[in-house]
Amino acid sequence: MAMSILTHVLAGLFGMGSWVTICGLWVELPLIVPQVPEGWYLPSYISIIVQLANIGPLFVTLMHRFHPGKLNETAVIYFIVGFGILASLFLAFFWSETVVVQGVERSVPLLLLIFFIPIVDCTSSVTFLPFMMQLKAEYLMTYYVGEGLSGLVPALVAMVQGVGVVEYANYFVPRYQPAIFSVEDYFFFLMAMMVVCLVAFILLKYHPAVKHERPNNINGNGDSILRWKNKKSEQKPMMRFGKAIQKPRSTFGTGKHTWMQVIYIYIILAWVTTLTNTGLPSVQSYSCLQYGDQAYHWSAGFEINTRQPTKCGSLVLMGLLTSIGSLIGVYIMGMAMMSPCPLLVNETSGAVIIVLAWFFFIFILSYVKVIVAVILRDEGHSALVWCGAVVQLGSMLGAVTMFPLVNIYDFFTSGDQCNTNCL
C-alpha cells in the first residue's frame, strides 16, 4: 500500500512538470504584458513561437517512425527537463531586458527564452506519456491529475501574487498596484517545480519500491522490452474462427477501432488543441482586458489544462462535449472581435460571464482530451506517440491562423485600459 501511494505521488509530481513552464508563463502575462514593448501583441507572439519549438516532438516522432526502438526516451526526458530548469532560471534574470532592433525596442531575450521553454513542454507530449506505459494503468490517471496541476498550481501562485490589480487616478489614468512578489520570484518558483519533476522522474526510474508497480516485472531500463510487448499486443490476428461478417478493423494499434473511428478521434484531438492551446489564447487579452485586469487574471488562471481521470471512452460523448466547448469558444472569439467594446463591457456581469466562459471552455475541452488519451492508451505505445504529434499539429494550426489576424491584419483592437471609447 505504501509503495502504491509513493508511486502515485511520484507520477503526479512527474506530470506536473509536463506543461508547468508554458502554463506558468501564460498566467503571468497580466503582469508581463504592461511592462514589455510588445504589449497586447505578446500572447500572439507566444503562440507562434511555441510552434517553432515543435522541432522537439517532430524529431522524436520521426525517430519512432523511421528508427523504431533506437531512441533512448530516458535520455530525452533527462535532457528536456534539465533544459527546462535552465530556461526558467535564465527567464528570471532576463525577462525584462530589451534590445533595439531596426530602431524599435524589442524583448529579444524574453522571446528567445519563450522559444526554448516550449521545446521542453511540447517534447513532453511524445515522451512523458510513453514512459508512463512502463507503469500500471492506474498510474496514468494520476499522471493526468499531475498534468492538470501543472496549470493549476502556477495559477494559484499567480493569484496569491496579486496579478493585475489596478486602480484609476482621475478615472482615466490606470495605476498598477505592486504585486506581493516579483515576476523574477515567480520564475524561480517555476524552476523549482521543474527540479521537483526531475527528482520524481529519477525516483520513478530507479526507486526499488516503484519496480513492484511495473506490469510483468518490467524494470527501469525496460524500454525495449516494453515496446516488444506493446508491439505484440498491437498485432491483430489475421485469422478468425467462424464465418460471421464483421466490420473491417484498422491495423492501427490493437485494431479495436475502424479507420474511420481512428481518423475521427485524431480530428477531434487536433481541433480541440487548435482551440485550447493557441487559437483562443492568442486573443485572450482582447477578450478579457476590456472587462478589467482582474477578469484577465482570473481567465488566465483558469487555463489549467484540467485533466480528471475517466474511464469513459464514448466517441459520441467526445463529439458532444467538443461541440459544446466549441460554441463557448465562439462566444469568447466574438467578445475579442468586438474589443474594445464587447458586450456588457462596463458591467460586473460582463466580467463574470467572460471568466466563466473561459473556465468551462478549458474544462470541457480538456476533458475531451482525457477521453482521447484514455482510448489511445489502450491502443499502445505508438498511438500515444502519434497522440502527442497530433496535439502539436493542432497547436501549430491555431498559431499560424491567428498570428496574421492579430499582428498583420489588425483584426482585433486593443482600445484603452479605461474603456473611454465605450463611455
Image (spheres, rainbow, N blue to C red):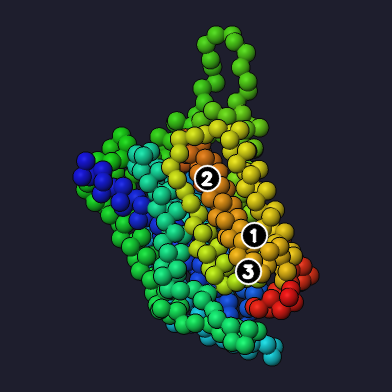
244 lies above or below 366 = above
Q: Residue furthest right?
A: 409
Q: How many marks?
A: 3
- Which residue position is annotated with label 1? 280
Dividing the picture into quarters, in which one does residue 344 lie?
bottom right
Q: Where in the figure is residue 121, as x and y percent of width and height?
A: 49, 60
* Residue situated in front as seen by the camera: 221 or 400: 400
Residue at x-position 26% and y-position 43%: 4
- Which residue position is annotated with label 2? 367
Q: Which element is circle 3 on?
A: helix
Q: Where in the figure is residue 340, as x and y percent of width and height?
A: 72, 71
Q: Does residue 12 appear in this view?
A: yes
351 lies above or below 99 = above
Q: Earlier in the sequence, mark 1 or mark 3?
A: 1
What is the distance, in whole Å, between disc 1 and disc 2 at their CAs? 17 Å
- Which residue position is annotated with label 3? 291
